Image (cartoon, rainbow, N blue to C red):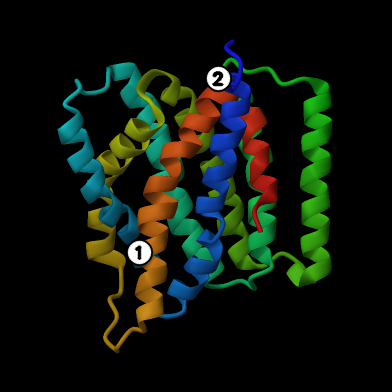
Amino acid sequence: MKIGQMPALSDSTRGMVYGLIAMLAFSQTLTATRIAVQHLDPVLIGLGRVLLAALPAALLLLWDGRPRPTREQLFSLTLVCFGVTLVFPLLSAWGMGRLPASHGAVLIALLPLSTAVAARFRTRERPSVEFWITALAGTSLVIGFALTQGAGSLQAGDVALLVAVMAGGLGYAEGGALARQMGGWRVICWALVLSAPFAFGAVAVFAEFPVAETPLSVWAAFAYVAMVSQFLGFFLWYQALAIGGVARVSQLQLLMP
């Protein structure tokens, strides 16, 4: 190394750095969802954001010009679609519209553990016993804090959030592993494009569109969850999981407000 030259960061360190930046991008997702769900239908928020994000995703893939995913990659992309572009956005929007804001902290607190468990079964990662003890302790602390802040007892909407957490963990783990082959941005772009027909059908049939004037802040919140939470944030997040380790980097989600 030359004098004055910065040492190259290891993959593990770069993964943590990318993950922290991604967490900053995701940090207002639940807040924005809660703002939007006060005026917009949860189906429109949860799946409409997929449709909006799928437009630039398709353009990027056309510009990239690489071959289509292989059959094995398509199977992994199906799991990513199920987890992060269909089930998680839809059920989290539906749940947040029916629960106090403090329940969102419980949702976020369970995602790191859910992701680590999915990584254990869907990837070759084998976290140590010490990792699991630390992960469980961190999750318990955050959930305990949320309960003291008024999260209270379980409600009907919590079931939706719990399913969203399990699906999201699977989508994170599968996408992080697949990003090692395709790159993080291609994973989310393909997932959005493949999910778009299903999202369009669900929105067309089930979504209720606003008939009254909708505040600009609501549309801004919707644009944020579509373009940042559902699209750009995943560029770094999947790359972080790929190079830093899915189980390890996923614990950064405990830092989410």
Query: Residue drawn at (35%, 80%), measured in percent from left and top?
Result: 216
Q: In which quarter of the image is residue 105?
A: bottom right
Task: Please indicate whether residue 181 sits to the left or right of residue 11 in the image.
Answer: left
Q: Of all residues shown, which one is farthest toward the front?
A: 3
Q: Residue at x 51, y 25 (%)?
A: 242
Q: In this view, does 2 lie above or below 109?
A: above
Query: Mark on residue 123?
Result: 2
Question: Where's the N terminus, which quadrant?
Answer: top right
Q: In the image, what residue type sits under mark 1?
A: Ala
Mark 1 or mark 2: which is in front? 1
Left or right: where does residue 32 sit relative to residue 182?
Answer: right
**Up-down relation of residue 182 to residue 252 (above or below):** above
Q: Name the residue under label 1.
A: 223
37 relative to 130, above or below: below
Residue 121 in sight here: no
Q: Which residue is drawn at 20% across and 41% down?
A: 58
Tags 1 and 2 touching, CB below 8 Å: no
- Please state, as top left, top right, bottom left or bottom right, where the C terminus lies in the image: bottom right
Crowding near the residue tagged with mark 1, few <14, some 14–19, many ≥20 C-alpha atoms within 10 Å: some
- Residue 227 visible within the image: yes
Element class at badge 2: loop
Against 110, residue 43 (above or below) is below
